[in-house]
Image: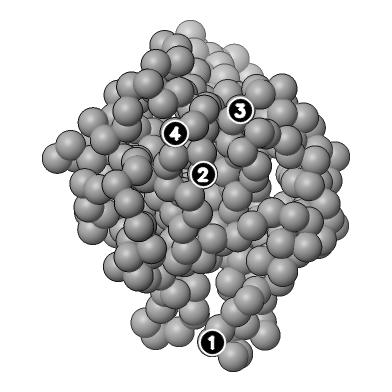
Amino acid sequence: MRFSPKRRWFLKSLLGSAAAMTSLGAYAFGIEPAYRLRIQRYAPVLPRWPEDLALTIAVIADPHVGEPYMSVRRLEEIVAVTNNLRPDLILLLGDYAAGHHFVTRPVSMRECAGAFRALKSPLGTFAILGNHDWWDDRSAQRSRRGPVIARTELEAAGIPVLENDAVRLVKDGRPFWLLGLGDQLALLGKPIRGVDDLRGTLAKLTDDAPAILMAHEPDIFPLVPRRIALTLSGHTHGGQVRFFGYSPLVPSSYGNRYAYGHIEEHGRHLIVSGGLGTSIMPVRFGVPPEIVHLSLGTASPAAGA
């Protein structure tokens, strides 16, 4: 059978498109989520952060541990990269539990916390919990209260977990506050209920030192007062699939408004990490796994990926 030039062109185009789609699928399901890692840098100018209080922070969000995508070995490599950044402070933003069923070997929270034990910084490592850390603990779901397994194992590894709590830290003689909010989607049911208490958490501030808030889901941000210099969140994974700054699906009531990156609203600042792992489906495209590196104060370098 002989094909006309137009038909040959059509078949070549069809085969080329099929090959391209196969390659993109292999990249999105195999390469980007499992092998890529970038350092996403921010140096925001914050109205309520003193210029002479220089602070660097490494942020790890949403590892969702479980092979083949987030093995203990890969987590250890991420810890080593984080330590090489030499941050003053390391923050863990929750969702340590796997958020999908595409797991060839589960990784226990004890193994995960054991890897995090190697994190090193002068001011220490602090953590909050995410919705999957609550959802993965069936006992906590039945009793409708914690502590969940993730908190128990992290604290056993020497990592304080802040749930509606605050700690006052000091850098170069200058104090600042670190706050951690309880998860906003902790308890399954109709409706899903949170264990977050923003008002109670803010009430633990006893002076006017600048404050940073860790909140797993960014949806709390419209309620965060200007008293907070910076809110840090994860949860969205940047939508996991992102085209030209837009994500088709974002697990947020606000859609793309808080999907990813540095957001400023009415003089208040939020940074949403794209995180490390995946949820629901093990796919990433256009938003590779990342460690966030923040520089605040006079030591702030230019921001960039």
Colouring of the image: one colour
Q: Amino acid at mark 2?
A: Leu
Quickly name the residue at label 3.
87
Give the alpha-carbon distance from disc 2 to disc 4, as whole Å.
8 Å
Quickly name the residue at label 2.
169
Camera-side residue of 42 and 165 = 165
Mark 4 vs mark 1: in front: 4
Work out which residue is located at the far top of the displayed protein and give it: 5
Q: Position of residue 71 (x, y in %)?
A: 81, 45
Quickly name the residue at label 4.
174
User: Would you identify the image quadrant in which residue 124 lies?
Assistant: top right
Rendered view: 281 above or below 239:
below
Mark found first going from the N terminus, 3 or 2: 3
Quickly name the residue at label 1.
144
Mark 1 vs mark 3: in front: 3
Give the alpha-carbon distance from disc 1 to disc 3, as whole Å.
36 Å
Q: Position of residue 248 (x, y in %)?
A: 37, 44
Mark 3 vs mark 2: in front: 2
Camera-side residue of 280 and 21 = 280
For the N terminus, which image quadrant? top right
Give the alpha-carbon distance from disc 3 to disc 2, as whole Å.
15 Å
